[in-house]
Amino acid sequence: MKSAAFSCSLFLLFLGSYSLASEQQMDVYEYLWNNNTDIANKTLHVDFLRQMQSGSLQAERYVNFTLQDINYLLEVTKMLKKMSKKVTKPDDLKAFMTDRYNKYKSFAASFLSQYLLTGEPPIKPTPAMKKYLSDYRAAMEANDGIYFAVALLPCSRLWIWLTNHLDIPNTNAYYTWKVENMNGHPEKHYKALLNNHLNTAKKVQKANAIFRMQMQNEHDFFATS
């Protein structure tokens, strides 16, 4: 993990850049990712993904991972339902919450159908998943809904990045997981929104703390699976 000094130096550099003329404003969407790629790289090398890549991952571990993923999807969908009602302005943030809720709701229904589940299964979250969802709920309590949007982004960006960096051939039993998660364009949903609303150094600092926390939660989910 980055040292506190290194992180501080990066943020001070950002502060300096942020004080330039508005036409030189940094891309916050990319800044959040670039400032936390150390966690992405660390996640890429956890045992679960290494064994998935080699094809040696035990089926039981993958089943447990999938159950936790289903629980995550169902719980975050519920949170998005609340946020789609809670956020009434500005218009772009309200539209984002409504769109994400509809997409998550559709995906959750498809996921349950794929595994022949007729209703929401009673899944006990692991300690890592319990913390992850708790941190999401804390982000929901923020007065500004933009920080819940920030909390959602690490999952969207990280999974695409991971699957594109894992060498899983089509002969591997986990190739389907790779294919299902390797495509997507989160920038279409997040980039303009974050760059528009995270328009002060203080807001970016808070967003970076949330983004990093959620990146670590993603790492811990994979590491404990």
Image: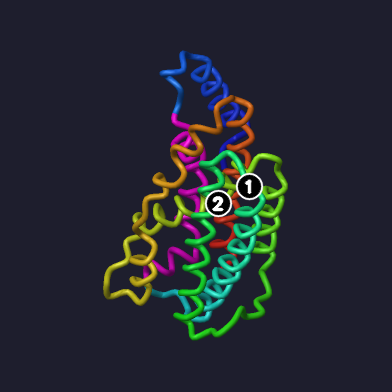
Of residue 216 and residue 113, the one placed in the foreground of this image is 113
Q: In the rendered view, would you say 131 is above or below 213?
A: below
Q: Earlier in the sequence, mark 2 or mark 1?
A: 1
Q: Say which residue appears at 50% left-offset and 74% top-offset.
A: 109
Q: Which mark is residue 97?
A: 2
Please state the horizontal and vertical placement of residue 206, each as a whole percent of the image. Answer: 64, 35
User: Which residue lies under the disc numbered 1?
Assistant: 87
Query: In terms of secondary structure, what is the magenta stretch mainly?
Result: helix
- Corner quadrant of residue 118: bottom right
Q: Say which residue appears at 50% left-offset and 64% top-offset.
A: 47
Question: From mark 2 to mark 1, how far is it between C-alphas?
Answer: 8 Å
Q: In the rendered view, would you say 31 is above or below 134?
A: above
Magenta-drawn segment: 27-54
Of residue 144 and residue 184, the one placed in the foreground of this image is 144
Q: Residues within 10 Å of mark 1 (few under 14, many from 20)?
A: some
Q: Which mark is residue 184?
A: none
Quarter of the image containing the C terminus? bottom right
The reply to whether discs 2 and 1 touch (Cβ–Cβ < 8 Å) is yes
Please state the horizontal and vertical placement of residue 68, each as a whole percent of the image. Answer: 58, 71
Which amino acid type is shown beneath numbered disc 2? Met
Rendering colour mode:
rainbow
Which amino acid type is shown beneath numbered disc 1? Val
Please state the horizontal and vertical placement of residue 146, each as a whole percent of the image. Answer: 59, 41
Question: Element under label 1?
Answer: loop
